[in-house]
Image: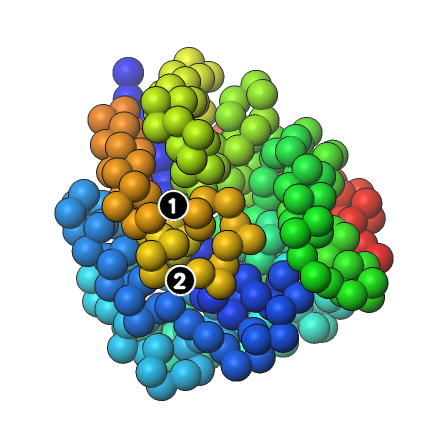
Amino acid sequence: MKQLVTSISLDLDDKWTYLKTHGDEAWKNYPSYLDYAVPRILDFLDKHDTKITFFIVAQDAVFEHNKPVLKQIADRGHDIGNHTFHHDPWLHIYSEEDVDKELALAEVHIEEATGVRPRGFRGPGFSFSDAVLKVLSRRGYRYDASTFPNILNPLARAYFLWTSSLTKEERQTRKGLFGSWKDGFRPNKPYRWNVNGQELLEIPVTTMPIFKVPIHASYVLFLSIYSYQLAMFYFKFVITLCKLTRTEPSILLHPLDFIGNDDTQDLSFFPAMRMPLNKKIRVMDAIFYLLKKNFKCATMEEHATAIAQRDRLPVLPLTMAKAAVSTSTI
């Protein structure tokens, strides 16, 4: 039987993006950890001999001091994706014209910094809409990776709002953050969108087959706060279910998976930021060991190529996207 593929990607959300979403005015100074986080992540990936996709927030590519570390990502053989310019998790309320401007601006700065024009996209906070999909298709993107079929979306949003200091207006803007409970019923395997007669590949951020709960690295790290053994049992169970259901997982990483409370204290509203770096790396090493043991690790671009070469996928109409967006918009 042919070995299953797992694609691995990292949303390169900088410190300011988390503060912005959280309603902290300090974001306007664009605080960053990219100078030490990116080299650390690249060295970790080299240790595991693994190439992944980095979804880059283009605002970071504007700053001259970030360009050398962003260029390293491409120079060391990793794939580059578009994670928008402004990193607004409320992208789903943008008009089609505004989405087009946002993606075009991001493309210019990402290509200028890395030398690579992105062909894959992921919306901040898993935000997307029919307008986003139309723009992606029109601009020649190969795939979208914004859907997150997770039944715990409302709980994640409630926790986020509870721990934030947002104004009433800011809460309204963010009330669609992470998606709705209906998103838990979206497909967990790749499919295609029918966008005005053209097909656009969708590679969901994989959740646990059958149960539709998160399996991305940040969630496993969260479990490891309580028990390393529990976290590893959980991830091994996920891998077993993926193999039994022939689900090729698309695994999501974040920079905070490689940053500990000994690096920074001002992101403590994220539960796993209570952990020191050495404990996080122990968990991340175990995650990569299990992924490499059970799957062929690939970038998102390589995963998209494999899917295109062998799979006949379901084709869904844009009304599926519209219906989900209408539950989240203000």
- For the question of whether residue 257 can be seen, the reply is yes
Q: Secondary structure at mark 1?
A: loop
Q: Is 74 or 273 nearer to us in this picture? A: 273
User: Compared to 313, does 233 lie above or below?
Assistant: above
Which quadrant would residue 135 be assigned to in this image? bottom right
- The quadrant of the image that shows the N terminus is top left
Q: Is residue 269 left or right of residue 46?
A: right
| Residue at 59% over, 43% down | 147
| Residue at 57% over, 19% down | 210
Q: CA distance from mark 1 to mark 2?
A: 11 Å
| Residue at 26% over, 46% down | 278
Which quadrant would residue 164 be assigned to in this image? bottom right
* Amino acid marked by disc 1: Met
Q: Which residue is mark 2?
A: 264
* Amino acid marked by disc 2: Thr
| Residue at 44% over, 47% down | 274
- Residue 291 locus on image (x, y percent): 29, 31
- Residue 251 locus on image (x, y percent): 41, 39
Q: Earlier in the sequence, mark 1 or mark 2?
A: 2
- Residue 224 locus on image (x, y percent): 40, 32
Q: Which residue is mark 1?
A: 275
- The quadrant of the image that shows the C terminus is bottom right
Q: Secondary structure at mark 2?
A: loop
Q: Is residue 117 left or right of residue 98?
A: left
